Amino acid sequence: MTERPESDDRPQTPEAAPVPTPPAKPAKPAAPATPAKPATPANVAPQPPAGAVPAPSGPAPAAPVVAPAQPAQSAPATSAPAQEAAKPALATPDSVARAKQHGRADENGTVYVTVDGEEHECGQFPNATQDEAIAYFARKFDDAEAQVDLLEQRLAAKAPTTDMRKTVAHVREQVAARGMVGDLAGLSARLDALDTAIGQAETREKEEQQKAKAEHLAQRTAIVEAAEKVAGQDPEKTQWKHSSERMGELFDQWKAHQRSGVRLSKSDEESLWKRFRKARTTFDRHRKAFFSKLDETNAKAKRAKEALIAEAESLSNSTDWGPTASKYRDLMDRWKASPRASRKDDDALWSRFRAAQDVFFDARKAANEQIDQEFEANLVVKEQLLAEAKKILPVKNLDRAKKELATIQTRWEEAGKVPRAHMRRVENELRSVEDAVKKAEDDQWRRSDPETKARSNSMLTQLENKIADQKAAIEAARASGNEKKAANLEKDLATSEQWLATLQASASELN
C-alpha cells in the first residue's frame, strides 16, 4: 500500500446528480400567418380567411390576443385542411362544464372569468362557438392545475423541493394574468398551501441534510480513527498481512463515502483526509522499517546457522564415535539457541544441518551393527552365566552363595561385551542376583550384632515387668469389687502379652 501523491491518491467526490423537475409549460401559441387585411379595431382579432381556423383575440393592451399554436418561423399561407390540423387541443366536455361555473363567453367569442365576484376578460376567440371559446381558456387552467397537482404529489411523496417555488411563482403569474377560466381563487389558495408545505419540506430537508451530514461525519471519523489504530500498533507485534488488508478495506470505505453524495464542509474534509493520509503513511513507514529490520535479522541468523552447518559438515566423517556424538549434541543446543531466519531459509538450513548429522550417525549405526554381530557369541556366554546365577537364589548358605557369585562375576568380565540392544537387560538381571546375596549378608550381620541383642533383651525385661504389674492391678481391682476396672486392665494386659510374644520371636532369630 504505497502512498501516492495527493492529487492522484485522494478519491474525488462526484458532482451531485440533478434533481428532476416537472415539465415546463408549453409556450403560448403564435398567431398564424395571414394575408394583409385592412386595419380593424384594437379589441377585435383579425378575421381569418374562409375555411381557416379562427384566431382568438382579446382587448389590447390589457389582454393580448390569444391564437392557436403555429410554427415560430414565418411560413407561407397554408390551405384550410393544414390550418385545421394545427388547431390547438381544447378542454374536455367535463372541463368545459366546470369552467362555465367560473366564467362565460359572449356571442363575439370574448371569454370572461369571475374571481371573488369580479369579472375579468381573458381574451377573445372569434368565429367560434361559445363552448369552443371557453374550452380554449379552460384548457389553460387545466394545464396550470395539473402543475399544482404534480407539486402536491411530489410533496406527498417527499420528493426534493428543488425548483418547486419557481413553479409556484410561475403558476401564480398565470393566475394573476387572468388568462384562463377556472376556479382561480381555489387554485390561488392551493398555491398558498403549497408555499407553506414547501417551506416545511425545505425545513425538513435541511434537518435531514444536517442529520445525514453529522452521521456521515461520524462514519468518516470512525474510518480515520480505525486507520489511526492500525497505524498505532507496535510494529514488533503487528500481523502485517491482516493489518495491510484492513488498511486497504478502510481506504475503500473512504472512497465509498466520498461517492455517497453527502458533502462535508471543506474544513472537515481536509482535516479528516490529512489524518487518514498520515495514518496510512505512518503504517507504510512502520511496515517498511519492520521488514527491513527483519531482513537484516534473517541475514544475521542465516550467517550464524551456516557457520553451525560448516562445523557439522566437518565432523560428519569422524569415526571417533563418543566425542563426536557429544560435539553434535553441543551443536544442536547452539542451533536451538540461535535466532530464526525466515521460514523458507530456516527450513533449507535445517535440512543441510540435519543431513550433516545423518552422515555421522548413519555411519556410527552401521559400525555398531557390525560390532553387535561380533558380540553375539559373548551374549550366549552371559545368558548361560545368568542361568547359573539365578540358581543361587534363594540364599540358604551365605558363604557358598558368595563363592559361587564371585566365580560367576569373574567369568562375566572375561566374556566381554554384548550387543547394545541386550546390554542393559543382562546387566540388570545379574545385578538382581548380586542384590539378593548382599541382602542376605546384611540380614545375617544384623542378627549377630551384640548391640541389637542387648537392646532386645532390655525391652523383654521391661515388658515382662510391666505385665507382672498389670496382673497385680487386675487382682487388686477384683478384690475391691471393681469389675469394670478389672476388665479394662485385662485389655491392656492382652496387648502387652502380644508385644512380648513378638519380641521373644525376634530374640530367637538373633540367637
Image (cartoon, helix red, strand yellow):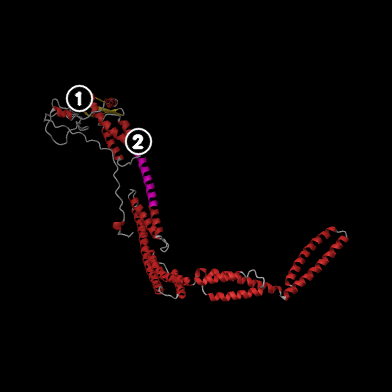
Instruction: Tell me the element at label 2.
Output: helix
Q: Which residues are magenta?
A: 192-219
**Which residue is at the front of the view, 226 or 426?**
426
Numbered circles on residues, count: 2
Q: Quadrant of the N terminus?
A: bottom left
Which picture quadrant has residue 176? top left
Q: Which residue is mark 1?
A: 128
- The residue closer to the viewer here, 141 or 259, is 259
- Check the image and report above or below for 406 versus 7: below
Amino acid, disc 1? Ala
In the image, taking residue 294 as reference, residue 19 lies left or right, namely left
Identity of the residue drawn at 30% across and 31% down = 184
Q: Position of residue 66 (x, y in %)?
A: 20, 31
At which x and y percent is residue 437? 63, 72
Q: Earlier in the sequence, mark 2 or mark 1?
A: 1
Q: Nearer the viewer, residue 224 or 50?
A: 224
